[in-house]
Image: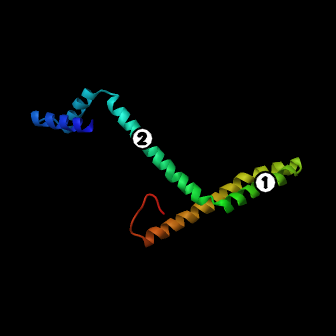
């Protein structure tokens, strides 16, 4: 389909040398209709989406090994047991402290990652979208 479009554009440009590429593209695109390229674009989007989800799942799988899953699960259980056994007044105080503590932990991780990225860029001249 793309080959037919390219041939049509080339034919229009040779027949009418004053026509711009964009005009020839629009005229040829109208021949195929609105939905003809939508199928190709949608199929490509699905393929790319599957590919990227596989990459993300691979990172997720490599990060969450069995010891990390066990540690995270046990930490959640311990915190839940501690939280349920507290008096009501203490729960309200702890709930008020959770957002600032989580934000400060997140800030520490972000600053550490930014520093590590800066050091990586300083030592490596190549820039990669997905780092190993």
Q: Residues within 10 Å of mark 1 (few under 14, many from 20)?
A: few
Asked whether the beta carbons under mark 2 and mark 1 sit within 8 Å of each other, the answer is no
Query: Percent x, y for residue 107?
Result: 62, 59
Query: Would you call the spot at circle 2 few (<14 residues within 10 Å), some (14-19), or many (20 or more)?
Result: few
Please name the residue shown 32% across and 30% down the image. 36
> Most extreme residue toward the front, as rendered?
66
Q: Is residue 41 left or right of residue 30?
A: right
Measure the alpha-carbon separation of dots 2 and 1: 40 Å
From the viewer's perspective, is residue 112 above or below residue 90? below
Question: Count the marks: how many?
Answer: 2
Disc on the earlier residue, 2 or 1: 2
Please name the residue shown 14% across and 35% down the image.
Answer: 11
65 in relation to 15, above or below: below
Is residue 56 rendered to the left or right of residue 13?
A: right
Residue that carries the numbered disc 1 in the rendered image: 77
**Label 2 belongs to which residue?**
45
Residue 58 x %, y %: 53, 55
From what the image shows, is residue 19 above or below residue 53? above
* Residue 35 placement: quadrant: top left
Tell me where residue 71 appears, x and y as whole percent: 72, 60
Residue at horizontal 87 percent and vertical 47 percent from the top: 88
């Amino acid at each position: 389909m793309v080959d037919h479009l390219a041939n049509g554009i080339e034919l229009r440009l040779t027949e009418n040398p004053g026509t711009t590429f964009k005009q020839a593209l629009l005229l040829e695109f109208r021949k195929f209709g609105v939905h003809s390229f939508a199928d190709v674009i949608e199929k490509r989007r699905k393929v790319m989406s599957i590919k990227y989800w596989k990459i993300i799942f691979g990172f997720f799988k490599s990060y969450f090994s069995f010891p990390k899953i066990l540690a995270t699960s046990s930490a959640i259980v311990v915190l839940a047991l501690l939280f349920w056994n507290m008096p009501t007044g203490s729960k309200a105080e702890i709930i008020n402290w959770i957002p600032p503590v989580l934000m400060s932990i997140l800030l520490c991780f972000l600053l550490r990652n930014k520093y590590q990225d800066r050091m990586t860029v300083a030592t490596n001249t190549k820039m990669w979208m997905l780092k190993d």
